[in-house]
Amino acid sequence: MPRTSRRNLLRAAAVGGTVTLVGSPAAAQDETYRPVYHFSVPDHWKNDPQRPIHVDGKTYYYYLYNKDYPELGTGTSWRIAATDDNVAFADLGTAIPKETNPNGSIWSGCLVVDEANTAGFGAGAIIALATQEDRFATAPHRQAQFLFYSIDGGRTFGRHEPAVLPNPGVVDFRDPKVIWDAQRSQWVMALAENDKIGFYCSTDLKSWSYTEGFIKQGIGVLECPDLFWLESSTGPGRWVLGASANAKGSGGPATYAYWTGEWNGTTFVPDHADPKWLDHGWDWYGAVTWERRTGGRIDPRTRYAIGWMNHWDYFGETPSWEADAFNGTDSIVREIALHWYSPTEPVLLSTPVRTLADHAERTVSLGDVAVDGITPLDYRGRAYEVRTRVTWNQLDNLGMQLRLSADGSRHADAGVYLAGGYAYLNRAYTGNPDATGRWMESRTPFDASRKEATLRILVDNLSVEAFMDDGRYVHSSLVYAQPGDDRLALFTDGGPAVFNDVTITEFRQI
């Protein structure tokens, strides 16, 4: 948001009337940064999510965990949590430890359920493929893919030697993502190889053959690839190829890039050369997607997704470590669906997982709120969802001041800057994890001729996630607001607007 607009808003706040704030102000004095309804590591460190699996009706979520953080060079294991609804997670401890492995740290990969016993460890065995540094390889070409297997439902894993996919002599060779290609009765691996996603095929998960590579330059090193099929209610189904990438250097996001297209068993052919992005904020990295199941069946039109809410540019700059002895939180699980905006424009839409509503503890309905300048709301809180549909005739800027301080000087802003033709999430005026001050505001296109906008914003102790245009654009960013900053205000600049049916929902601590 332009600084001139911010000055106008602060001036309006200074002359505005006082309101009686309701909510939970006592909670604002609690110094914890532990999220209320987002997943966070129990202690020390987490980073990349690993694609969850379904076993006996339950979802198991694995992630990279470092019990020795912040000591340097100590590396990650795989830790596991279980969930029935993708909101509340129960910790189950370490599943693949680093200490007992001769290759040391366990990096990113994936898990599959080997129903047909293709790998020979038993029908229904859980197979994990992950990157490690091969102790027999020559530096710097040590990244190789190793196989682990579980016969107790994914709680503990044995190790298979040697590497199932040795390094062919490249530096970046990691993050295997495996799917079963039922049409061709083969396993398919997508592998991150710098600016290429390599494709490999196997019948037994242990012997892999290279088929082809998808190359995309100009958006940084590709990591944590993803490949899946989605049907659509608005057009034909498409294959989707995704990867985490840091395109900040070229003015783009640093989250999850994706392409829709065709997979023919050996090659991915994209519909368009340039990627779209599943998130436009600064902190939705290493994301994974997985199937949504209803009644035991896979929903062909919906997938779940979760991302690590941090970034390597400032990974250690978190107040949660000093306050709560942990560093690592995830986005809310979202549901993604394929929507065709035209015969040539398929887009993935995102919405917060529907089971989040089952954890609602209190709802505050404020009705329609007319705003011309800045309007503080009768609400105080630090962890909530706020929803509204905004309408106007003539306007330059509109939005919400989230985690607002009592004096109005600190806040994170989410809204639409019509004068510039974009929607935004701006963390410049509150705790910003980026000490350089470069990555403050994220932006997405917005048609300035429109006269309404929908905003659905999730706020928690460490983060803000703004879902705009019914989930076509999402901004997920860390926001390190001070614990006492718990106000909320609506604002406009350049004219009035009506924030229709303003509803705030609080959630139980998970």
Image: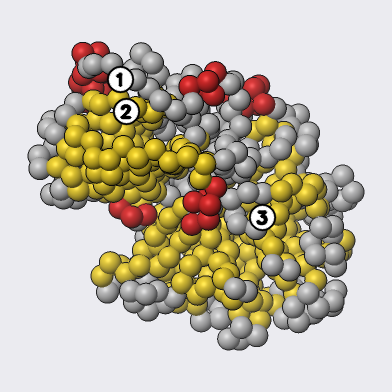
Q: Is residue 395 left or right of residue 165?
A: left
Mark closer to the chain start, 3 or 1: 1
- Looking at the picture, which amino acid does disc 3 mark? Thr
Q: What residue appears at the point 80 percent right and 65 percent down from the top-left corner?
A: 153
* Circle 3 residues within 10 Å: few <14, some 14–19, many ≥20: some
Relative depth, front residue between 345 and 207: 345
Circles 2 and 1: CB distance less than 8 Å? yes
What label does residue 83 carry, if any? 3
- Circle 2 SS class: strand
* Circle 1 residues within 10 Å: few <14, some 14–19, many ≥20: few
According to the picture, the residue beneath numbered tag 2 turns out to be 377
* Circle 2 residues within 10 Å: few <14, some 14–19, many ≥20: some
Q: Nearer the viewer, mark 3 or mark 1?
A: 1
Give how far apart the Cα atoms at labels 3 and 2 are: 35 Å
Q: What residue appears at the point 40 percent right and 62 percent down from the top-left corner?
A: 348
Q: Position of residue 69 (x, y in %)?
A: 74, 32
Give how far apart the Cα atoms at labels 2 and 1 are: 7 Å
Relative depth, front residue between 362 and 404: 362
Q: What residue appears at the point 75 percent right and 63 percent down from the top-left corner?
A: 128
Q: Is residue 483 above or below residue 305?
A: above
- Looking at the picture, which amino acid does disc 1 mark? Val
Give how far apart the Cα atoms at labels 3 and 1 are: 41 Å
Judged from this view, the residue extending furthest toward the bottom is 184
- Looking at the picture, which amino acid does disc 2 mark? Leu
Q: Is residue 176 above or below residue 1?
A: below
Q: What residue appears at the point 43 percent right and 50 percent down from the top-left corner?
A: 279
Relative depth, front residue between 449 and 406: 406
According to the picture, the residue beneath numbered tag 1 turns out to be 19
Mark closer to the chain start, 2 or 1: 1
